[in-house]
Image (tube, rainbow, N blue to C red):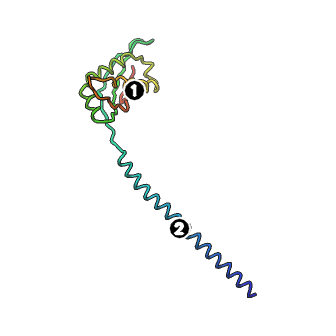
Amino acid sequence: MAEKTSGSKKLLWVMIILVLLSSAGAAAAIYMVIDQRDSGSQGGEMSQVIERQSPIFMRIEPFTVNLADDNYGSRLLYTGVTLRVGNEESKAILEEHMPQVRSRLLMLLSGKQAGELTSPEGKQQLAQAIIDRLNVPLTENQPPLDLREVLFTEFIVQ
């Protein structure tokens, strides 16, 4: 009987030691995960603050243009456009040459047919065509414009 008590005592001590070791291992693992998350989020927050830039928008007054004739006769397009540019210099150049910008847009739009402009794909193609048309230099020795996106704020085909 004495042997059974000492064997069960040894087994009890082994179990207690294993529970303590596994608890210590779990605590160390939790500490490492929390430590990595804290140091990673501080570095991530700093890089996000550095990378974040406010967008620069340039609104072009809405205008109406006659579209090219199609099967339904003369059609009209009423549209408002906002450009997202990459820097203040591009915005200043476009503002200085607004009559040329509007003329280029009117010439581009007046050559389109209503059927081309009513689908989402047609609007995306038009946005790309506007960027391409405005990237042609407006004056001599003009630095390249940084046009990022064309946003249609108003768009009615009638």
Task: Indicate which label's residue lies in the foreground, 1 or 2.
Answer: 2
Please state which amino acid type lies under the numbered disc 1.
Ala
User: Is 50 or 96 nearer to us in this picture?
Assistant: 50
Q: Quadrant of residue 104?
A: top left
Q: Position of residue 150 (x, y in %)?
A: 37, 30
x 34%, y 33%: residue: 84
Q: Residue furthest left?
A: 96
Q: Position of residue 44 (x, y in %)?
A: 41, 52
- Looking at the image, residue 38 lies above or below residue 21: above
Quarter of the image that includes the N terminus: bottom right
Residue at the image position 26 percent from the left and 29 percent from the top? 93
Residue found at x 36% / y 20%: 77
Q: Position of residue 76 (x, y in %)?
A: 36, 18
Report helix, strand or loop for mark 1.
helix
Q: Which residue is mark 1?
A: 127
Q: Residues within 10 Å of mark 2 (few under 14, many from 20)?
A: few
> How far apart in space, not on screen, are marks 1 and 2 (Cα)?
56 Å
Indicate the secondary structure of the residue bearing disc 2.
helix
State the residue in front, 144 or 117. 144
Considering the image in quadrants, where does the C terminus appear?
top left
Outermost residue, bottom side: 2
The residue shown at (38%, 32%) is 149
Number of the label disc, if any, that sits on residue 135: none
**Amino acid type for the residue under numbered disc 2:** Ala
Q: Earlier in the sequence, mark 1 or mark 2?
A: 2
Front residue of 79/84: it is 84
Q: Residue furthest right?
A: 1
On the rendered structure, is 17 left or right of 158? right
Give the residue at mark 2: 27
Q: Is residue 18 left or right of residue 118?
A: right
Q: Is the residue 156 above or below the residue 19 in the image?
A: above
